[in-house]
Image (cartoon, rainbow, N blue to C red):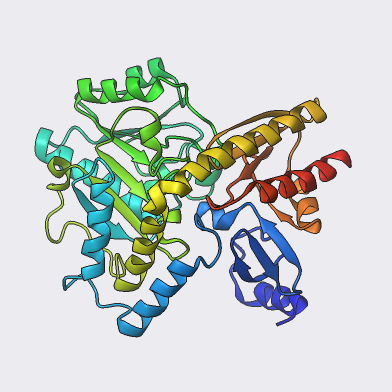
């Protein structure tokens, strides 16, 4: 289908929920995609941090092909071998004892919210149900996840939000202490890095204090690692950077290497609150998506965790190159930040036009929080890819 036809029929048949950019990728390999017009782009969006191994990684593709020939879906009325294998991999490489599978990050956060409240109801009674989250956070578009999200622009038109959520400034220990009530707070829900909120990195000791506050008040610590998990920051899970362990963690995006899967991980004590009939997902953890996720995790961990080390090295290189833009464009480029290959460049003006100009020059990047350019290349990216991307961005910034 030609590009004009794609645009015309999209307007005719699709609900208008996305501010789509004028690219229709038709194929992808590694860090590159090709549009309907066969034009090549270097992709530093990666499906919004989904394609952690790049587009169509051979091991993920083969795993999907083999499983699709064998069994695609059967439902959780029965035992699913791939689901057990994937759960074991996640447990063996994290703090968790048990896993629940679903289909997306929003679903995972819904599950975590339900699990926290169910656990607290059983352990403490019905009064301990409030969940403290952060301003500027993003946890998803379903009602529980949306109510937890600390950005009013996502709430507009959908009010009233669900009760029982309190929002405090991210990184502010004293504000969190004031908000957490031993009698009412069942959980604190935070992103290790506020990704959608502009790649906001907390102070180094913040999560140590958060863990102490939760322990003192009897609240569970839920970490939303939907975007930071699966090697994105140079560790398999970002909580490992901060020297703490959560009680519940949510995953999605990079977990399936491109296919839709989410997960709720929890300690055994907390996971026991979920009993048959309390929560479910028809498609959750089906054989096909689990095969893709197993291949993704195994690829990240093989070769003595080469890809995690590559993420750290390439993240440092990208950070260095973005910092050079601050010196090259004073007053326009205000600051660079991030961990691993979740990086950002903050501008002094809205950056939507920059994103479109980069597209015209063969680079896909993302604008979030109005004036923050977000970079989420695969953890397989190499220095020449980063240099090419920053060179394109630099040429665009020169024309502003």
Q: Residue at x 47, y 25 (%)?
A: 169
* Quadrant including the N terminus: bottom right
The quadrant of the image that shows the C terminus is top right
**Looking at this view, is 61 or 193 the one in front?**
61
Question: Extreme top residue here?
Answer: 174
Residue farthest front in this picture:
303
Q: Is residue 21 visible?
A: no
Rendering coords of residue 390 (x, y %) = 73, 43
Q: Nearer the viewer, residue 212 or 323?
A: 323
Point 30% across, 81% down: residue: 71
Q: Is residue 121 left or right of residue 104?
A: left
Camera sees residue 175: yes
- Residue 108 x, y percent position in the rendering: 34, 52
Does residue 78 lie above or below 356 as drawn? below
Q: Position of residue 244 (x, y in %)?
A: 31, 29
Residue shown at the point (47%, 26%) measured from the top left: 202
User: Would you place residue 92 above or below residue 42 in this image?
Assistant: above
Residue at point 74%, 73% (across, down): 38
């Amino acid at each position: 289908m030609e590009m004009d036809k794609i645009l015309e029929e999209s307007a005719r048949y699709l609900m208008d929920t996305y501010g789509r950019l004028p690219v229709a990728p038709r194929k992808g390999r590694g860090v590159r995609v090709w549009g309907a017009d066969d034009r090549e782009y270097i992709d530093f969006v990666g499906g919004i941090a989904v394609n952690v191994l790049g587009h169509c990684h051979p091991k993920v593709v083969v795993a999907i092909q083999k499983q699709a020939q064998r069994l695609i879906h059967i439902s959780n009325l029965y035992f699913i071998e791939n689901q057990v294998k994937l759960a074991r991999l996640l447990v063996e490489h994290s703090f968790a004892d048990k896993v629940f599978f679903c289909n997306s990050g929003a679903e995972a956060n819904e599950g975590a919210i339900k699990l926290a409240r169910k656990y607290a109801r059983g352990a403490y009674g019905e009064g301990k149900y409030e969940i403290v989250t952060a301003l500027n956070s993003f946890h998803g578009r379903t009602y529980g996840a949306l109510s937890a999200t600390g950005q009013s622009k996502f709430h507009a038109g959908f009010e009233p939000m669900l009760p029982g959520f309190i929002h405090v400034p991210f990184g502010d220990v004293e504000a969190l202490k004031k908000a957490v009530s031993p009698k009412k707070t069942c959980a604190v829900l935070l992103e290790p890095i506020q990704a959608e909120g502009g790649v906001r990195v907390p102070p180094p000791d913040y999560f140590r204090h958060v863990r102490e506050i939760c322990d003192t008040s009897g609240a569970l610590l839920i970490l939303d690692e939907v975007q930071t998990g699966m090697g994105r920051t140079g560790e398999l899970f970002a909580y490992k950077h901060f020297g703490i362990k959560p009680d519940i963690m949510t995953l999605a995006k990079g977990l399936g290497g491109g296919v839709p899967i989410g997960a709720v991980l929890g300690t055994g004590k907390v996971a026991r609150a979920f009993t048959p009939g309390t929560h479910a997902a028809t498609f959750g953890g089906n054989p096909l998506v689990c095969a893709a996720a197993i291949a993704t995790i195994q690829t990240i961990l093989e070769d003595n965790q080469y890809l995690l080390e590559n993420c750290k090295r390439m993240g440092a290189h990208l950070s260095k190159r973005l910092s050079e833009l601050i010196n090259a464009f004073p007053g326009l480029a205000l600051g660079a930040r991030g961990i691993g290959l979740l990086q950002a460049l903050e501008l002094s003006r809205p950056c939507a036009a920059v994103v479109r100009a980069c597209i015209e020059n063969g680079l896909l990047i993302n604008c979030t929080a109005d004036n923050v350019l977000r970079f989420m290349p695969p953890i397989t990216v190499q220095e020449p890819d980063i240099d090419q991307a920053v060179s394109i961005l630099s040429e665009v910034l020169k024309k502003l």
